[in-house]
Amino acid sequence: MRRITVLESGDVKVVRVLSEREDDPIPEHTHEGDEIAYVVRGKARVHVDGRGDSEVAEGEAILIPRGTRHYGFLSEDCVLVAIYHP
């Protein structure tokens, strides 16, 4: 998985995430602010504590509240845009 920062301005950060293989892992982590993850291409399987697993397909997004542990897996061709904001 590769992460490329697209924008960083004040408290807002936008990151493009590109998978490099099938079931490319996103390690378990949290953020200080809310995260919106939008799938541009492919699909992602995201586990959010308290909500369980979600499949997020191309053109769909998921909101991950601040401080919530989450992790996931990306399909081989996945391009995801993550937006972080407190």
Image (cartoon, helix red, strand yellow):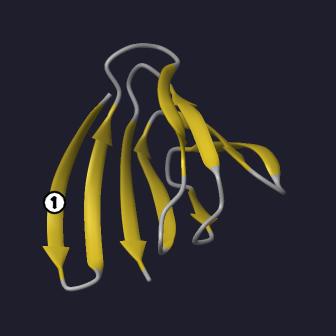
Dot 1 surroundings within 10 Å: few (below 14), some, or many (20 or more)? few
Give the residue displayed 27% in from the left and 70% down from the top. 13
Q: How many marks?
A: 1
Q: x, y (%) of residue 29?
A: 53, 47
Relative to the observer, which residue lies in front, 74 or 28? 28
Farthest top residue?
21
Q: x, y (%) of residue 52?
A: 82, 46
Give the residue displayed 54% in from the left and 56% down from the top. 30
Give the residue displayed 47% in from the left and 75% down from the top. 33
* Kind of element beneath mark 1: strand
Q: Is residue 34 above or below residue 5?
A: below
Left or right placement of residue 18 versus residue 46 in this view? left
Left or right placement of residue 6 versus residue 54 in this view? left
Q: Is residue 34 above or below residue 62?
A: below
Work out which quarter of the rendered image holds the C terminus and state it. Answer: bottom left
Q: Is residue 37 above or below residue 10?
A: above
Work out which quarter of the rendered image holds the N terminus and state it. Answer: top left
Left or right placement of residue 73 versus residue 40 in this view? right
Give the residue displayed 17% in from the left and 55% down from the top. 5
Relative to the observer, which residue lies in front, 9 or 16? 9
Q: x, y (%) of residue 41?
A: 40, 39
The residue at which mark 1 appears reads as 6
Q: x, y (%) of residue 7?
A: 16, 68
Left or right placement of residue 49 versus residue 44 in this view? right
Q: Amino acid at mark 1?
A: Val
